[in-house]
Amino acid sequence: MKAMVLSKLSSLVKNRAPLEFADLPEPIPREDEILIKVSVCGVCHTELDEIEGRTPPPRFPVVLGHQVVGRVEAKGCRAGVFEVGERVGVGWIYSVCGECKFCRGENENLCPEFRATGRDANGGYAAYMTVPERFAYRIPTVFSDSEAAPLLCAGAIGYRSLRLTGLRDGQNLGLAGFGASAHLVLKMARHKYPNSRVFVFARSEKERSFARELGAVWAGASEEKSPEKLDAIIDTTPVWKPVVEALGNLESGGRLIINAIRKEEVDKDYLARLDYPAHLWREKEIKSVANVSRSDISEFLELAARVPIKPEVQEYPLEEANRALIELKEGKIRGAKVLRID
Ligand SMILES: [Zn+2]
Ligand SMILES: [Zn+2]
């Protein structure tokens, strides 16, 4: 089968083609697994963190990609949830232990044995993939394959981030960074909190005007002061400056949610500007988001279908995965990027 594989870690500044085209054997589903013929796979910022070694895959070569939409091609002998031919999706959560205190509670995303799709197991930058059927989801019919893919990570983790803000309707929400996840959070927030005003901080004027188009009341650069204090801010940037600046824009008792699996080191010295009275005092909180649970994905798919919340997508053929990744790295973004495989 055709696949784009990662064989070693590399810097995207030095190596603009980290993935190589390969012909791999088609995977065979184990007892509780399904084999999926992949239609499309979303491109996520986490792929950049994997390629550059901030969250490295445990072995190589590996097939990246964790926003997978396709159809069930075959099933293991004990897999009985889906029919052959049915459309399914896979997100970042590939498997968990199912027994630890986090799995028994409602926090399987924190399981120490959390395995991620496209990092700890082969993902969707390929013609086929296998997954335990418990970690696959039916895709509501209102979405095309390409529209559904970004919902599986960008959307689901955005849903988790928005939930963790503890926002109430009418309170001000800030979004630092305006990529695939944030543009879905804006759409979600306008539905869930119709009386809340959304303020967006983004690095390019293109992203800022896109945010205004989608209903942000204000959009500025990350170092700007927002015209009003913000009760919650979600940061989806890969760096530190927006974190410090966001804390300065936070209302007393407000909460900053950091939705990033890793932060880059490039501007870490900016943290030295952290001024306790300006940025943290008055009961401000910081909380990170880690992974997603199955219920984040299934609840979000249901909500997105009901509203409906559809992402803006840019499609690339699988063979051009490197170009999609470089454009993501360089901030050439409008909505979400998706690879077309079949
Ligand atoms: Zn992702
Ligand atoms: Zn567990």
Image: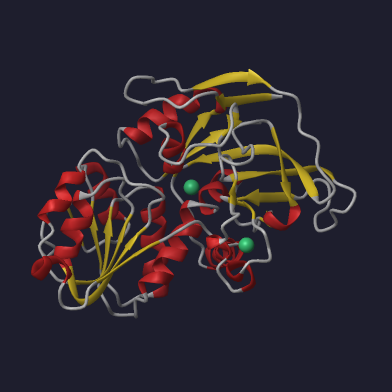
Spot the residue most to the right. Answer: 77
Residue at image coords 53%, 59%: 292
Q: Is residue 133 visible?
A: yes
Residue 32 x, y percent position in the rendering: 81, 51
Q: Is residue 221 at least partly visible in the picture? A: no
**In the drawing, does residue 132 fall left or right of residue 10?**
right
Query: Looking at the figure, which quarter contains the C terminus?
Result: top right
The total of numbered circles placed on residues is 0
When the figure is inspected, residue 154 is found, relative to residue 297, above or below; the finding is: above
Quadrant of the rendering where the N terminus is positioned? top right
Left or right, 278 with respect to 206, comes to: left
Residue 326 image offset from top left, x and y in percent: 38, 28
Percent x, y of residue 3: 63, 26
Can you say whether 147 is above or below 11 in the image? Answer: below
Q: How is the image coloured?
A: secondary structure
Residue 340 falls in image quadrant: top right
Please give left or right for residue 280 compared with residue 198 in the image.
Answer: left
Where residue 341 sits in the image (x, y, percent)? Answer: 62, 31
- Residue drawn at (74%, 51%) of the image: 132
Query: Which residue is drawn at the image coordinates 41% and 53% (left, top)?
Result: 181
Position of residue 18 relative to residue 38, above or below, is above
